[in-house]
Image: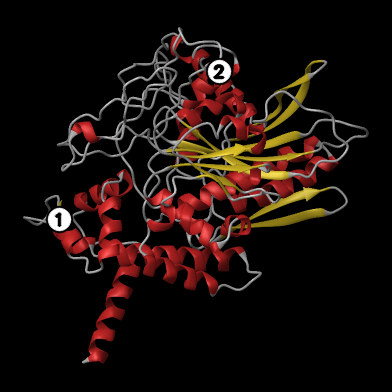
C-alpha cells in the first residue's frame, strides 16, 4: 500500500481538483475530485494558471508550469496523467490528493474534501515492501469481487477473497487499504448496482489504473466471468493489483486462476503464492512456475515478457479492429494536439485496450493529462472537465457525454451508425498530408490476420517514423554551453529548420503541447549522449537520407 498522507485536501495544491458547489441546482451534475501524476517542471517557470469557475462547471487548479516562452495566462491548466509509458523517466514532487481516496469517498456518499487529517506515519515491513517496489513481485494482491444482494432491485460489489491477507498494519494503513479495496470494487463493476442474474455471460478481461499519493501508479487487471453453479446468478470479478504494466502476461495468469477456480477456490492460493515468489522476467525473458493440479499432476506455466517492453501493455489489433486506418489517424491527430477524446463501447475490454493503444501511438512522447480507461458511472462527471483527457465510457452512458462541446467522441461499437459521434471538424487537416499518406502506406503492408507481436511492430514503426520525420532533428538544437551543464532548446531555430510548409505548420502547434514540452525538458537535462529506440530510429533515418543524397550526386 501507499505510505500515509494527509487527507485534508489543500485547495491550492498543484494537483487536479474539482471542488463541489453547494449552491448548484438539483439538476446540476455533482462535481468530483481526482488526481494523477505530477511531472517534472521547469525550475525557472511560474505557477500555472487556474481556470475561472463557470456556473455549473468544476474548477481545476493546474499542475502544469508554463514553458519558458509562454506567459502564465496562456497555461492550459491541464491535470496530469495517471498513465506513463515504459522507459520514460518522470520525477517531481508527489501530488497531495489521491484518486483512490476520492473514489472511496464517492462510493460511500461522502464529500472527499472533508476527510480528517492523518495520524503519524508508521513504516510497513520494509523488507517485503522493498522486494515488491524493486519489481521482484509480480503483483501486490489478488481479490475476488462478488455481487451481493443489496435489496430486491440492486447488488453491491464486495470483496469475498483476498490474497495475501495483510496483518500487523497500523490503523491508518488499514483505512487506506479499505479505501483501495472499495475503489477496486468500483472499477471491477463500473456499471453500478443494477444487475440481473444471468445464466450465460461472456467472460471479459480489462484493465484500469489507480494513482497513489506518492505519484506512482498501480495497474488493476480484471477478469469478469460467471461463477460455477446452477441457475441464474450474477458474475464475479477477479482482480490483480500490480505496479507492472503487462496486459498480455496478466491475461495468461488469469487463464490459470480461472482454471483453478473451476476446481476449488483453495487451488488458487498455492499458484498465486508460487507466482508471488517468482522473479519478474526481464524483457524477452521467460519465468517458469510449477503448479500442482489434482488429476493433472505438476504443470509448468511459462510466462514470457515481450522484447519491446514499452509495448507490453498494448494490443493494437483491438484498436484497428474497431476503427479503419484512416479513422485511427484522425484519433491520433487529436491526441497529438491534446484534445478531449471520449471512446464509447459496450465491452470493458475494448475500452481499456483501445485507450492504452492510442496512448502508445504517441511514443516516445507520453500523454500528460487525465486518462481513465473505464469511467465508473459514479464518476461520469469527469467528462465536464475543460482540460485534455482520454476517457472510456460505456455506451449506455452516451447521453451524459454528448451534451459537452468541443469533443471527439469515438464509437467503437460493432453496430455503430457512425464512428465519430462528435468532433471538432478539423481532425483531417492536423497532420501533414504527405506524412498521413506515408503512415497509411506503412499500415497497408501488414498481413491480415496477423499476430499481436507483428501488428505491434508494424503500427509502432509507422507512427514512430512520423515523429522521426517531424521532430527528429531536435537533438541538433539542444545547445550546451559547457560540458556537463544542462542544455537549452533553441525552439525558433528548430522550427525554422523544417523545409515543408505543412510539416512546419503542424510542428508549430505540437511545440505548444505539454507532451512536447516535458519531453524536451528531459532532453535538456541529459548531459550524456541520447539513447533509446527513438534515437536509434533517428540515426537510421539520417543515415538513409545521407545515402540518398550521395546517390543523387
| Nearer to us in this view, 313 or 14 | 14
Q: Which residue is at 42% across, 66% downward?
A: 436
Q: Is residue 441 above or below residue 354?
A: below
Residue at 28% in and 79% down: 545
Q: Quadrant of the C terminus?
A: bottom left
Location of mark 1 (residue):
492
Give x and y (percent) for residue 243.
50, 40
Q: Position of residue 491 (x, y in %)?
A: 17, 54
Closer to the camera in the image, 420 or 124: 420
Q: Position of residue 39 (x, y in %)?
A: 32, 38
- Residue 420 shown left or right of residue 290 in the figure: left
- Up the image or down, 111 lies above or below 282; here it is above
**Residue 258, numbered circle:** none
**Residue 360 relative to residue 77: left or right:** right
- Badge 1 local density, few (<14 within 10 Å), some, or many (20+)? few
* Residue carrying label 2: 106
Rendering quarter of residue 16: top left
Most foreground residue, 455 or 214: 455
Q: Residue furthest left?
A: 481
Q: Earlier in the sequence, mark 2 or mark 1?
A: 2
Quarter of image, res 288: bottom right
| Residue visible at 55% across and 18% down in the picture | 106
The vertical placement of 506 against 349, above or below, is: below
Evaluate whether residue 168 shows in this view: no
Amino acid at each position: 500500500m501507499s505510505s500515509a498522507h494527509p487527507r485534508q485536501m489543500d485547495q491550492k495544491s498543484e494537483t487536479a481538483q474539482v471542488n463541489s458547489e453547494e449552491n448548484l441546482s438539483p439538476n446540476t451534475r455533482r462535481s468530483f475530485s481526482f488526481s494523477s501524476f505530477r511531472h517534472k517542471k521547469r525550475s525557472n517557470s511560474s505557477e500555472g494558471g487556474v481556470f475561472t469557475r463557470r456556473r455549473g462547471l468544476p474548477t481545476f487548479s493546474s499542475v502544469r508550469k508554463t514553458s519558458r516562452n509562454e506567459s502564465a495566462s496562456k497555461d492550459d491548466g491541464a491535470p496530469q496523467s495517471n498513465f506513463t509509458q515504459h522507459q520514460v523517466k518522470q520525477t517531481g514532487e508527489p501530488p497531495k490528493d489521491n484518486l483512490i481516496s476520492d473514489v472511496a469517498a464517492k462510493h460511500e456518499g461522502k464529500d472527499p474534501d472533508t476527510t480528517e487529517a492523518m495520524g503519524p506515519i508508521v513504516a510497513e515491513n520494509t523488507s517485503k515492501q522493498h522486494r515488491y517496489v524493486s519489481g521482484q513481485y509480480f503483483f501486490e494482491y489478488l481479490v475476488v469481487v462478488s455481487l451481493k444482494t443489496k435489496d430486491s432491485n440492486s447488488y453491491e460489489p464486495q470483496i469475498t477473497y483476498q490474497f495475501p491477507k495483510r496483518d500487523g498494519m497500523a490503523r491508518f494503513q488499514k483505512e487506506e487499504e479499505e479505501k483501495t479495496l472499495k475503489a477496486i470494487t468500483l472499477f471491477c463493476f463500473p456499471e453500478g448496482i443494477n444487475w440481473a442474474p444471468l445464466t450465460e455471460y461472456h467472460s471479459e478481461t480489462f484493465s484500469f489504473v489507480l494513482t497513489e499519493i506518492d505519484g506512482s501508479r498501480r495497474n488493476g487487471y480484471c477478469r469478469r466471468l460467471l461463477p460455477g453453479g446452477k441457475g441464474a446468478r450474477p458474475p464475479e470479478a477477479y482482480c490483480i493489483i500490480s505496479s507492472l504494466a503487462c496486459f498480455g502476461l496478466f491475461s495468461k495468469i488469469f487463464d490459470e486462476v480461472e482454471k483453478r477456480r473451476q476446481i476449488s477456490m483453495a487451488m488458487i492460493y498455492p499458484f498465486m503464492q508460487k507466482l508471488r515468489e517468482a522473479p519478474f522476467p526481464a524483457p524477452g525473458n521467460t519465468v517458469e512456475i510449477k503448479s500442482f493440479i489434482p488429476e493433472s499432476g505438476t504443470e509448468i506455466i511459462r510466462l514470457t515478457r515481450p522484447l519491446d517492453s514499452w509495448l507490453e501493455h498494448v494490443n493494437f489489433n483491438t484498436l484497428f479492429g474497431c476503427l479503419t486506418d484512416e479513422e485511427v489517424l484522425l484519433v491520433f491527430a487529436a491526441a497529438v494536439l491534446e484534445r478531449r477524446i471520449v471512446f464509447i463501447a459496450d465491452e470493458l475490454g475494448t475500452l481499456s485496450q483501445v485507450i492504452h493503444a492510442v496512448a502508445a501511438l504517441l511514443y516516445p512522447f507520453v500523454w500528460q493529462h487525465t486518462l481513465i480507461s473505464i469511467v465508473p458511472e459514479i464518476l461520469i462527471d469527469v467528462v465536464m472537465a475543460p482540460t485534455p483527457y482520454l476517457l472510456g465510457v460505456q455506451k449506455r452512458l452516451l447521453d451524459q457525454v454528448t451534451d459537452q462541446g468541443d469533443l471527439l467522441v469515438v464509437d467503437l461499437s460493432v453496430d455503430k451508425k457512425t464512428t465519430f459521434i462528435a468532433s471538432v471538424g478539423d481532425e483531417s487537416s492536423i497532420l501533414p498530408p504527405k506524412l498521413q499518406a506515408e503512415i497509411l502506406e506503412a499500415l497497408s503492408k501488414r498481413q491480415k490476420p496477423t499476430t499481436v507481436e507483428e501488428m505491434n511492430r508494424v503500427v509502432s514503426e509507422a507512427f514512430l517514423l512520423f515523429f522521426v520525420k517531424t521532430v527528429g532533428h531536435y537533438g541538433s538544437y539542444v545547445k550546451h554551453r559547457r560540458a556537463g551543464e544542462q542544455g537549452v532548446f533553441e525552439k525558433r531555430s528548430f522550427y525554422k529548420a523544417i523545409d515543408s510548409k505543412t510539416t512546419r505548420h503542424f510542428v508549430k502547434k505540437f511545440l505548444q503541447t505539454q507532451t512536447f514540452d516535458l519531453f524536451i525538458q528531459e532532453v535538456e537535462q541529459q548531459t550524456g549522449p541520447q539513447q533509446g529506440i527513438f534515437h536509434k530510429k533517428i540515426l537510421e533515418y539520417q543515415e538513409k537520407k545521407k545515402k540518398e543524397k550521395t546517390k543523387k550526386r
